């Protein structure tokens, strides 16, 4: 896999990988790519296809490397949300805009239908699928502190835990 931190012009044909580093167009902005550029890219060899090779997780690690910060270790170092199932990526965990609960946004990344489970480490009483405005669309059953979700191919989903 060809990983990069900012370039969208890439291609793969037969046994050839390509990455466009600079687009030198003069229209609509004559000075659009003038100046110094900085980017990173890497080759990630793996077995199997991109799903089996865990390419999405490696791309996230490449684009968001771990950072060390100083401070006091928290009493609870448990993950905020545990995801059980492959083929889904949690993109955001944030306070709800109205201050009532926590919103988790995720998407199905393998292009198939799948069932996953989410188990928050924080306390909550209910879970609802919400739209982008965080308006409730439907209730999600909570069983033993976790929710089960059925995802469609590439579906983006937001869940509010209250």
Image: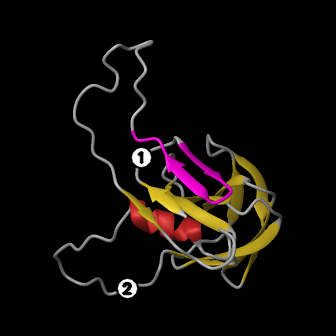
**Could you tell me if the residues under marks 2 and 1 are in contact, i.e. CB atoms within 8 Å?**
no
Can residue 32 be seen at all in this image of the molecule?
yes
Q: Residues within 10 Å of mark 2 (few under 14, many from 20)?
A: few
Residue at mark 2 to residue at mark 1: CA–CA distance:
34 Å
- For the residue carrying disc 1, how many other residues have a C-alpha within 10 Å: few (<14), some (14-19), or many (20+)? few
Residue drawn at x 72%, y 56% is 129
Q: Which residue is mark 1?
A: 6
Residue at point 48% right, 52% down? 99
With 60 as the anchor, is 140 left or right in this view?
right
Earlier residue among tags 2 and 1? 1
In front here: 59 or 160? 59
Q: What residue is shown with label 2?
A: 76
Q: Position of residue 161 (x, y in %)?
A: 61, 64
Q: Nearer the viewer, residue 10 or 125?
A: 10
Q: Indicate whether 68 appears above or below 92.
A: below
Q: Position of residue 122 (x, y in %)?
A: 51, 76
In the rendered structure, the answer to whether residue 115 lies left or right of residue 22 reads right
Q: Label 1, secondary structure: give it.
A: loop
SS label for mark 2: loop
Residue numbers of the magenta segment: 10-21
State whether residue 150 is above or below residue 77: above
Q: Residue furthest front?
A: 15
């Amino acid at each position: 896999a060809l990983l990069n931190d900012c370039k969208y012009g890439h291609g793969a044909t037969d046994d050839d990988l390509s990455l466009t580093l600079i687009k030198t167009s003069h229209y609509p902005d004559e000075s659009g790519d003038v100046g110094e550029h900085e980017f990173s890219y890497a080759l990630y060899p793996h077995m199997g296809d991109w799903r089996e090779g865990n390419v999405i997780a490696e791309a996230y690690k490449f684009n968001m490397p771990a950072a060390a910060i100083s401070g006091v270790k928290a009493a609870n170092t448990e993950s905020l949300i545990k995801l059980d199932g492959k083929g889904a990526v949690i993109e955001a965990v944030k306070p709800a805009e109205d201050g009532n609960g926590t919103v988790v946004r995720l998407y199905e990344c393998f292009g198939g239908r799948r069932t996953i489970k989410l188990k928050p480490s924080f306390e909550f009483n209910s879970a609802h699928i919400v739209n982008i405005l965080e308006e409730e669309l439907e209730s999600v059953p909570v069983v033993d502190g976790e929710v089960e979700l059925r995802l469609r191919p590439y579906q983006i989903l937001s869940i509010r835990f209250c």
